[in-house]
Image: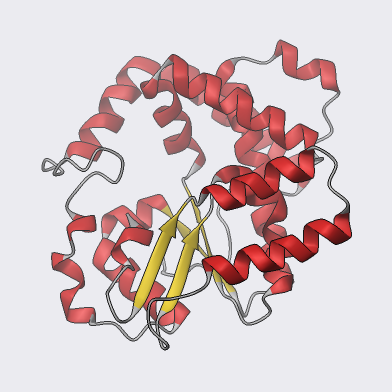
Amino acid sequence: MLVQALDQPGAATSLSEPVLLNDMVGWRRRGADPRDHGRVMSDALALLGRGFGPDEAVVIKPSNIFNPLARGALMLRPDARAILLYAPLRDFLLSVARKGLWCRLWCRELLEGYLADGFVQLGFEPRDYFRQSDLQVAAVGWLAQQQAFAALLAWAPDRIAALDSETLTRDPAAAVAAAMDHYAIAGDRAAIPAHPALTRNSKSGEPFAPGERQDDLAAAEAAYGDEVEKIVGWAAAVADGAGIPLTLPHALLPR
């Protein structure tokens, strides 16, 4: 939703999960020389960062698998700014449970990649992951991302802001306007509420029904609430032991 809403001709071009950045992740995992990888990453960012007009900004939303490379990319572009978009833990787990088998498998695949990247620093032994449920694995991936996001915010608080999905969906027009301010995009704020990205599902393109998101979460709560409650408690204890905030600081908008 957010990256699509920031796409305004003449002001900003947005790119959602460009394959080129996924290829950079794959190359690194296959053992790319760090110096070669850094040089090609700079070229990749230069290619992706070309707007259609001389004053047009480019906003890139990478895939989750790019998270281990985020700091390096920001170091290559010291003038770039970022927004770290995340879902509250309980909402994330309810969404994973509601979406079923394929989403649970995706969470395992994501964690597999994070482990290969050395991105998970939570004190678990490799064998521990075989004893964890699907939602525990999903929570571990969420915690690894949250830990990295907190470190990024501490590293460059003047360039990076955090935005949770609950705040975004509660008032999407305000969130988009705040994002435009953060990125210094000079688009028309008055046109934001009518942008198609705010009224349609970003995956399917279908119009949102009134209360659709709340109904989906309520249905997931009824079906999986007990399991999710247990995993949230477990993950909160892991987060406390690792010093990971469940709510990130430097919020783009107040909660």
Q: Position of residue 94 (x, y in %)?
A: 41, 28
Q: Relative to 150, is 215 above or below?
A: above
Q: Relative to 194, is 92 above or below?
A: above
Can you name the residue that lies furthest to the top here?
A: 131
Tell whether 119 sits left or right of 184.
right
In the figure, residue 55 lies in which quadrant? bottom left
Q: Relative to 116, is 183 above or below?
A: below
Q: Position of residue 162 (x, y in %)?
A: 52, 63
Tell whether 211 sits left or right of 106.
left
> What residue do we see at 40% from left, 30% from top?
95
Q: Is residue 146 visible?
A: no
> What residue do we see at 72% from left, 37% from top?
114
Tell whether 103 sits left or right of 9.
right
Q: Position of residue 97 (x, y in %)?
A: 43, 21
Q: Position of residue 214 (x, y in %)?
A: 24, 38
> What residue do we see at 43% from left, 76% from top?
51
Q: Relative to 244, is 104 above or below?
A: above
In depth, the one of 116 and 58 nearer the eye is 58
In the figure, residue 157 lies in which quadrant? bottom right
Quadrant location, the C terminus = bottom left
Q: How many marks?
A: 0
Q: Is residue 129 visible?
A: yes
Tell whether 14 sits left or right of 139.
left
> What residue do we see at 54% from left, 26% from top?
106
Quadrant location, the N terminus = bottom left
Is the image coloured rainbow, by chain, by secondary structure, or in one colour? secondary structure
In depth, the one of 211 and 232 nearer the eye is 211
